[in-house]
Amino acid sequence: MITLERRPEPSRMWQALTPVLAVVLTMIAGGLLFALLGKDPFEAIRTIFWDPLFNPQFASYSRPQLLVKAAPLILIAIGLSLGFRAGIWNIGAEGQYIVGAICGAAVGLAFYPTEAIYIFPLMVLAGAIGGTLWAMIPAVLKIRFGTNEILVSLMLVYVAEQLLASMALGALRNPDGGGFPGSRNLQQYPSAANPELIAGTGAHWGVVAAFIAVIAAYVLLNKHLLGYQIKLTGQAPRAARFAGVRPNVLIALCLGISGGLAGLAGLFEVSGPAGQISIDFNSFYGFTAIIVAFLGRLHPIGILLAGLLMALTYIGGELAQFMLGIPSAAIQAFQGMLLFFLLGVDVLSNFRIRIKPKQVA
Amino acid sequence: MGDPWGNHDWTCDLSVLLTVDGLSKAYPGVIANDDVSFSIERGEVHALLGENGAGKSTLVKMIYGLVRPDSGAMTLSGAPFAPPEPRAARAAGVAMVFQHFSLFEALNVAENIALGMENPPPLRDLARRITEVSEAYGLPLDPARLVGHLSAGERQRVEIIRCLLQDPKLLIMDEPTSVLTPQEVDILFATLRKLKAEGTAILYISHKLEEIRALCDSATILRRGKVVATCDPRKKTARELAEMMVGKVLQQTKASGADLGDVALEVRGLSLPPATQFGTPLRDVSFEVRQGEVLGIGGVAGNGQDELLAALSGERGTREGVFLNGQPISKLGPTARRRVGILSGPEERLGHAAAPDMSLTENALLTGHVRENLARNGFLDWRKTRAFAERVVNEFDVRTPGVSSVARALSGGNLQKFVIGREVLQNPDVLIVNQPTWGVDAAAAAAIRQALLDLAGQGSAVVVISQDLDELMEISDRFAALNGGRLSEAVPAAGLTLDQIGLMLGGAHDMEPA
């Protein structure tokens, strides 16, 4: 009989090892899935994990994509992880990302065609404020009326999507666009553009912001009283109140920070890789970032690595679709397996497996 | 049963009800029971005595079928007894009253009892049976009352009657008096003596030695999972029993003997609505504590102890009525109150006083960062925090591999020493503790009481909220009782008799102090 025994203390070794184990298990189970679809599993895994970085034919295109895709994931996930640590569940980062992009783009477009150095910083500010305000809606409702932030923030994603469509078709539509939906392309408006900073790396201002966010979150969680209070609230809410943490302040702060970072991610995306506000501007970064946050164990460095890994499966997945004809649903299932296995093997850090002979009654 | 112990035959004596022979049970990192053997006769009240963590709970859980022994055997009435689950144990005539009740507050007494039965009779018949049994055994209980409205003592009666309805041969009681007033204890003992006279055996778990000496015929003493002695408790002094239990000579706490100074903490007309539906509101609570004084606040659980602590620590907002050294501090939150000098230690160690999965260093920060200056502009000084945690561990003899151990890895007594030490070392003007020695072994409890007295001796005011009256009588200068959220007038503790205390706990506030 196999039983699980609770460890007296969580095992540090397993906490570090489980993400690696989860990736390995995902490769095995994913390989099986691809084999059942009639594809060569080894080639499929290689196409997803190896070719985007090292294949001489594709790497020059796909390698910069890694940072482009990872930056918004990391930026959003860092914000979410603070709330998740405190037991505050912002599921609506996708909406905050959209609203941040709209606000930032709107500020930039308002100045068109003026060229000035202050325009981009203003857009960054507007993006962060937009995301923060959108996240303050669930925060205020929770503080004032005790509503569930999971539901409210999630529902606001759909509101944000409608807002995006209305902006792309209405207020922000390109007057010179011949009636097509979508705003002006900010990439072609130098004062509002978020360009690649170093050619061939994909690094734009959003990547810089993501790295700053990782470092800031690390310092906050490990060296600052506020980070300690966030962790304490998540682990022992009563002890946190005893310690003098004001729950309402923490709710507003965690939702505000995660909304602000999501808004920033949206702004950097709309002024950089995406270029314009369009109906289908959002690309599930806000939801995928939830997976990234957990894959990274809500730890800033872990999130950095998890964001890169997740971006890799995106790029590799596209490559596998294109090269091997693996259906996109299979790629999504593959990404889902990653979270599934991570949560599954997580049990090992708190429990040990013991096999003992079945007892005689 | 193919085990090697089965042929061991000292069960032919018909007066013996239960024999336990060589029971062992190991958990990861700890042997809870190591080759435990003893026997209980019919009509015997047998005490199981030991410190926390001595293995009493594991042992009775094995008898009640909740835990399977690794080795060893039991016989009940001469037949092999190895209950795979509590239902089998109940069918064999073993019943148990747990320390923590499993009752639904929103249901009435009869409904609660019916829920625990295999084939409950119609509620009306059951209610009649409950009334019969409760009258026969002198345990007054109205089957139609909501459990949420019952006192802890009455709730325990529900559990006892639930057991008695099964006509048990062996009744196991786990720390039954920890929630009772002295008068309720007398009622309970009368019931137990009646059961004994009818031939029911009682296995009585406790660490209250005077009770055991008053009630029990024999005692098995456990220490670190092993039987260290079997004796007749009536022929030993409480001190001898305690020393057998702890395995060393105990220090006796000395009264602080400090001169009383000015009023440090004053509470005037403090009222607070309950936090939850079944919580207790504080009603017009007033008292004062002087520098160097220990005020003991007694009361049965659920009479407003948690609320009083929360109102004084600042965890629950108060509007008016709390003064420190004459200054109003009602509107201050927990952090600000710590800054001005009020510290506190709540009852629940894990999850309230300490975060279970955080290290001792992190837990030292929990209340220590204000007065110990562990954070500068919000940035934490981990080196200083660690040093503070180590100071608590060293000065309060907290047994732990190190300050990086997580709180839940510590035993109850050690964690409690850490929690109390953390507050005491911050030199509070006023320290308020709730149940400071609850579930703590005798040696640790003595150390904690001494620390509180020493703190008062240095001129701090100390408020001890406790259900342990012996403890309160031992360390308090003055005593007050909480009943239904009201606090009685504080009276000098010296010379109070148990009867007077019982009346105060029962709510007879107009009683003239002796």
Image (tube, grey):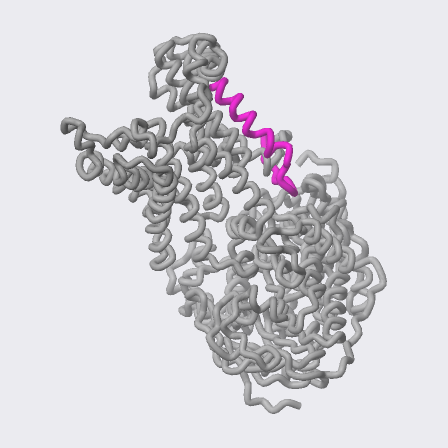
Up-down relation of residue B466 to residue A81 (above or below): below
Q: Is residue B254 left or right of residue A106?
A: right
Q: How far from the left and from the top, in percent, is residue B304? A: 52, 72
Q: Quadrant of residue A346?
A: top right
Q: Which residue is nearer to you in this view: B50 or B405? A: B405
Part of the protein shown in magenta: A1-30
Q: Is residue B101 left or right of residue A171?
A: right
Looking at the image, how many numbered discs can be counted on the residues? 0
Q: Is residue B132 left or right of residue B438?
A: left
**Magenta residues: mostly which secondary structure?**
helix
Q: Which residue is nearer to you in this view: B151 or A234? A: A234
- Quadrant containing the N terminus of chain A is top right
Question: Which residue is at a point 40% across and 58% down the rendered structure image?
Answer: B121
Question: Which residue is at a point 51% across and 38% down the rendered structure image?
Answer: A298
Q: How far from the left and from the top, in percent, is residue B318? A: 48, 73
- Residue A20 drawn in magenta: yes
- Residue B440 drawn in magenta: no
- Quadrant containing the C terminus of chain A is top right
Q: Farthest residue in the right direction?
A: B249
Q: How far from the left and from the top, in percent, is residue B481? A: 59, 79
Q: Quadrant of residue B449?
A: bottom right
Q: Is residue A340 visible?
A: no
Q: Which residue is nearer to you in this view: B478 or B209? A: B478
Q: How far from the left and from the top, in percent, is residue A49? A: 48, 17
Q: Is residue B288 visible?
A: yes
Question: Which residue is at a point 66% across and 53% down the rendered structure image?
Answer: B57
Up-down relation of residue B295 to residue B218 (above or below): below
Q: Quadrant of residue A204?
A: top left
Question: Which residue is at a point 44% across and 14% down the rendered structure image?
Answer: A60
Q: Which residue is nearer to you in this view: B424 or B208? A: B424
